Amino acid sequence: MANVTCCGSLYPPFSFGTSTDRAVTGHWVPGSSADTIGVYRPGQPSQWILSTVNQGYTGSNLIVINSFGAPTDQPVAGDWTGTGYTKIGVFRQGTWILSPDNTNYNSSTALIGNFGMPGDIGVTGDWTGTRKTQIGVYRPSNGTWYLNTGTSFSYTSATTVTVTFSVPSGGTPVTGDWAGDGKTRLGYFDGNGNWTLRMTPVSGDGSGNVTVAAGGLFNAVRVYPNPYKAGRGDTGITFDQMPVGSSIKIFTVSGRWVTTLAADGGGKATWNLTTDSGDKAASGIYLYLVTDGQGDKIHGTLTVIR
């Protein structure tokens, strides 16, 4: 059985699941005030084993769903019906099959829709703050998220929001209410211990476009490599995922201006590690200040090691 450890001393390690299970979490019990763990066990058919308490495997504390999904499906979970608790579901190469009540698959009651295509990764969240889980996909082939802000589980152009926010190769797309305002945002884990969380709320304007709050994209700005170390083959330090039209000023820690950069049409700029006068930047810590076209600012530090 696989071990689960909860934060600090609240829970001792306990066993729940096997090495081939897929972990899921959710608010499985109507009226409960806490999320609990569970596993999706791929098979023919696939089985769901959901715990009603965050404790080890005991038959009296389980919800077992013996037939929902196929071996290669991606398990998903959410409150599809807005009734206050989490239901199970699967994403199958562009097709969503969602349970309205956490029971075995029933073709007459399952919520089924086509949204996405083979190769997409299913994502879920409350994109618009409706207190109901909505669906979406991340498409690795073009670095684009397609998010369904409507009430149907099938594609319609009027309710589909597209967001270009590329996940690095080997990374994992993630979603969550990072701002705590009831709206789910996007993000990714790059597989090397680094998380990038996009703080811009996603909302549809009726045309399939994205409405972006002023300055919101700043929370997704990436600066890499940081630290810069000579001899690793890098030619400079890149600022990425900035609003188009942004400028970057770089200073020494004493406040002396070093150089100014401008973001290109893709929201990117690279510092070639020289000063505005053409001298090589010395080893040390530098400050940067990014300002977008509306005057919003964000700052940080970067390190150069020669």
Image (cartoon, rainbow, N blue to C red):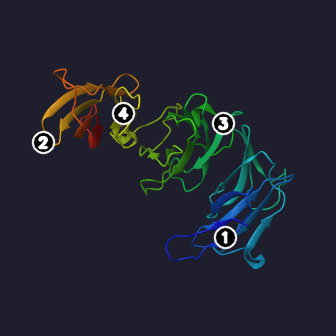
Circle 3 residue: 120
Residue 19 horizontal side relative to residue 236, left or right:
right
Query: Total label count?
Result: 4
Nearest to the observer: residue 223 or residue 105: 223
- Disc 1 or disc 2, which is closer to the eye? 2
Quarter of the picture containing the C terminus is top left
Give percent across and percent down for residue 277: 16, 21
Helix, strand or loop at mark 2: loop
| Neighbour tally class for label 1: few under 14, some 14-19, many 20 plus, Cα within 10 Å | some
Give percent across and percent down for residue 289: 24, 38
Marks 1 and 3 in Cβ contact (< 8 Å)? no
Nearest to the observer: residue 18 or residue 34: 18
Q: Earlier in the sequence, mark 4 or mark 3?
A: 3
Circle 2 residue: 254
- Disc 2 or disc 4, which is closer to the eye? 2
Helix, strand or loop at mark 1: loop
Circle 4 residue: 242
Label 1, label 2: how far apart the Cα atoms are: 57 Å
Question: Against 211, is 79 above or below?
Answer: below
Amino acid at circle 2? Ser
Label 1, label 3: how far apart the Cα atoms are: 30 Å
Amino acid at circle 1? Val
| Neighbour tally class for label 3: few under 14, some 14-19, many 20 plus, Cα within 10 Å | many
Q: Residue 29 carries which label?
A: 1
Q: Which of marks 4 and 1 is nearer the N terminus?
A: 1
